[in-house]
Amino acid sequence: MAIRVFLLLLLFLSSAIVSFSLYEDQAGLADWHQRYIGKVKHAVFHTQKTGRKRVIVSTEENVVASLDLRHGEIFWRHVLGTKDAIDGVGIALGKYVITLSSEGSTLRAWNLPDGQMVWETALSSAHHSKSLLSVPINLKVDKDYPITVFGGGYLHAVSAIDGEVLWEKDFTAEGFEVQRVLQPLGSTVIYVLGFVNLSEAVVYQIDSKIGEVVAQKSMVFPGGFSGEISSVSSDKVVVLDSKKSILVTIGFIDGDISFQKTPVSDLVENSGNAEILSPLLSNMLAVKVNKRTIFVKVGGEGKLEVVDSLSDETAMSDSLPVADDQEAFASVHHEGSKIHLMVKLVNELDNVLLRETIQMDQHRGRVHKVFMNNYIRTDRSNGFRALIVMEDHSLLLLQQGAIVWSREEGLASVTDVTTAELPVEKDGVSVAKVEHTLFEWLKGHVLKLKGSLLLASPEDVVAIQELRVKSSGKNKLTRDHNGFRKLILALTRAGKLFALHTGDGRIVWSMLLKSQACERPNGISLYQWQVPHHHAMDKNPSVLVVGRCGSDSSAPGVLSFVDVYTGKKITSSDIGHSVVQVLPLPFTDSTEQRLHLIADTVGHVHLYPKTSEALSIFQREFQNIYWYTVGADDGIIRGHVMKSSCSGETADEYCFTTRELWTVVFPSESEKIISTLTRKPNEVVHTQAKVNTDQDLLYKYVSRNLLFVATVSPKGAGEIGSVTPEESSLVVYLIDTITGRILHRLSHQGCQGPVHAVFSENWVVYHYFNLRAHKYEVTVVEIYDQSRAENKNVWKLILGKHNLTAPITSYSRPEVFTKSQSYFFAQSVKTIAVTSTAKGITSKQLLIGTIGDQILALDKRFVDPRRTLNPSQAEKEEGIIPLTDSLPIIPQSYVTHSHRVEGLKGIVTAPSKLESTTHVFAYGVDLFYTRLAPSKTYDSLTDDFSYALLLITIVALVAAIYITWALSEKKELSEKWR
Amino acid sequence: MDKGKAVMGTGRRWAVEFSDQSTVPSSRDILDPPGFSRASQEQDDSANSRQKKDAEANWKLQKAWEVAQSPFKTLMMMGFMMWMAGNTVHLFSIGITFSALWQPISALQSVGKIFEPFKDNKVELLMPKLVFLALNLGGLALGVWKLNTLGLLPTHASDWVSSLPPPQEVEHSGGGFVFH
């Protein structure tokens, strides 16, 4: 008996483990993975040699990548750490990509063709300073010109061949800030220009061979500098004075410093404050003044002269040598829905080498950056291509008056994600082009049949795989029966909203936020505004995008309402108050618009939508709406309750004042809040009871008003390992956000953050570092309601004489108790999420975003406080796993299988209509989507179920029955005749 | 059981016909032959048939008791099978349990039919029927008990609570860190 049960259990367990993984040919069927790089900061073209033309880019997401110039595909890519921001990029020796990162303290060389790291050098760094990289243009391949790097107060010369530091020079003197490091071409002298306390210009001449200071000159400028600087030639720079009204040309020919002052008002009439723009143009600088961009030519004597003036919305590239000692630069400006690309010679601005007009999608916004590259056409003339970075962070290559390719790099910085339904399929409306003819359908099934009967040739296998990936209807733009087709709405840092199709990840629509009050609001967060479900079925669903004009928290907010089906903005309103928190309420009006409260900095809350109906709904529930704030700096959690309409102060009847109700104060000397978490408001919980072995009953404490708070001792708030176990402790709390009551407190001595947690139903799972054990730990806390535990009389339950479904209030002070258990976990974690299904019946899996940017699915059964070392027979049958000290990492249970979601930031799950299945979307620099069935797809046949085989089997059986019947009849007849 | 019934049925029909004819007055229009004494023969005949009937009733009662006690054997058999099947829910144990439930129910449904052959004015069938019913009910109870041990009966509080959704909350709260 025991053996039998054990075998059964083993079978069950092994099947359960198999259910995580997928077969090789199933990869890419339901999942997709998109690779991005982020907003490009620097770009270096590599087009000299024949062969693959490429561009090396570094981005704001700390990615260095090599892109194919023909198609925009990624040849190779490296995502550096979040603290490893790239300061400069260059190509040395024609074969190495050099990157300077971490504020000038790390220099790396990557092999240009395949992106392998060749060498890495850690440079000494004393304090925070500008970091400057200058890679010499190498004319002779075999000769090693050193790379000059300035960073952290030191100037280094580094050999490009092996990364050896040839010499370093200390510039860490107090108050001295290095602004430019210049080396005239072919010269052995390096000029280091810096300011002392922004009032004295100092120039050092350094021998580039040995790193010794040859000469040093300094000169005090009485007005002081503002720090904006533009180097116009190898011996001249132009800076702005501290009032931003005078341009100062600093010449340092042969080490002698000379100042030449030119008031901006001499150049432009009625000038306001000026601003030096970043493009490096030879003997010229671009200045932004009076909302115009003016080009100022710098004469030989430091004389300034305005040569051209363009509109404000112009982006320019650095100048680039073209034939015959001439330099050219590209500028791009907008005109309506078109952009004009012009390439001009620096010396003769009237000589326009190239003028192109390109139609541009207005949802890409303005041009932010231009990088230009030239090539020699077959007729020996110069051709130009321009790489432009748009306001939505997208990257486009323009060549010969057309967009050759574009990359939606905005998706590398997703800030908030929600999902939305697709429109219902209407009769007579053929939305998709993927509809198959009957013949194709049949052909597909015959192919599948061949595959399942192992008759398929290798070509057939490829065809089958292709067919499965493009499986009929997967990419349709209509709702499906299982809810597998959905839209993923992603808000990016650039303030653009993307709708991605779950079938193949393509962009269905995209929209850049706009507002009247400010040109481009920042997107903050995304909410479901209207989801027609029972009422208002004629309306399209819509989402609310909360944005803000400016980065300051007191900046006025902007609300945009976007139609999900069409991607068109319904309305957008400048709400005139700040946005610090958005509270979606659990009430909807008659058109299924969800009520939202928006809290501002003064402590008022504002009700949306601003309709009288919403107001009456809100006033009905006025007493029951609470609001809490977490002050991470002062360590206080405050609970507020609605007080009254703020009619005394403003005439706005949708504005309400609040009153502080409770506070939870953490002692600042011993505890610092590092993480808070609540349940997802839209999570569905199937049952309130938890049935243990022997039908024992526990009542879950399922409340939306629970806040999980993790605090560490202030010393332990730093990096892992920076404190001793005695100095650091981690305390977690479960706090009721209505009454401020602390339901549970758990202290971990000798433990440290960062804490990553997930909260679902009645349990919290959190991940932290145990300093004593030198290991990461995962703890689960389950919370149960003791006051309901009396409800165990079967007859009362049968007759319905219980109050288990009656609404409960937090003021009834329910007695709770918790169960918890801790385990070691071998990996560092970036984020944790949990699967969510439509009815909440399916068992749950934790989705752990690991440090390797993969997602690990871990059954909730592994983090169950009821696990014991030797589970009883009944417990084993129930599926309780024997307790082990660490959680298993099963390689097959990585849901990302071979992919890596580089720079993983978050994981979002959403239920499909099929109870067994959940959508999983992970974002970071990359995007990854898949569907998961934590308990297998128990409610549907798998995709690769062969209907044709079933049909053929049935037909064959029927035929066999008929034939045998006929045969037996015949035989019987002949028997009778005998 | 069927065989016994058939035998009894034919025997009875014969007996009835015979005695009836002998008592019909019209048949006595013909005078008895000389030396024949009807009285003694009738008396003898009636004594004989009563004796026969008594035996038959006894036999019927005995048979009825046998039938009534027959479920006991199946009960024992079932008990043994159930013990063999174990307490886990799988195909075997469910099959046995449901047959254990079905057999008494079908027997109870046809209790009248089963005892019909033994119906007689002189035979007291109540007790056998009661015993039969009791034993079958016992079998049924055994089945139900088995069903319960398999955990298939909603006799626990958990069975009634697990479908209850969590209660609504009166208060609503939201918030958290402020947006930066």
Image (cartoon, grey):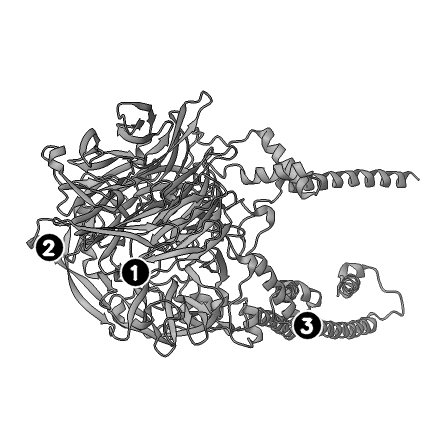
Label 2 marks a residue whose chain is A
Vertical placement of residue A44 versus A940, above or below = above
Q: Which image quarter: residue A331? A: top left
Using a 10 Å C-alpha cutoff, classify the residue at mark 1 as few (fewer than 14 neighbours), some (14 to 19) or many (20 or more): few
User: Which amino acid type is shown beneath numbered disc 3?
Assistant: Met
Q: Amino acid at mark 1?
A: His
Q: In this orientation, which residue lies closer to the viewer: A299 or A72?
A: A299
The correct choice, above or below, for A148 with respect to A958 in the image is: below
Q: Which residue is mark 2?
A: A646
Write the start and end of the magenta stretch as one range: B72-76
Q: Nearer the viewer, residue A468 or B62?
A: A468
Instruction: Determine which residue is flagged by label 3.
Output: B84
What is the spatial separation of the Cα atoms under label 3 and label 1, in whole angstroms? 80 Å
Which is closer to the viewer, label 3 or label 1?
1
Report whether A386 appears left or right of A935.
Answer: left
Residue to which mark 1 is pinned: A127
Q: Please state the horizontal and vertical placement of residue A730, each as a whole percent of the image.
A: 35, 73
**Outermost residue toward the top?**
A379
Image mark for residue A74: none
State how far apart marks 2 and 3 are (Cα): 76 Å
Identify the element where label 1 is drawn.
loop
Residue A482 seen in the current view = no
Q: Amino acid at mark 2?
A: Cys
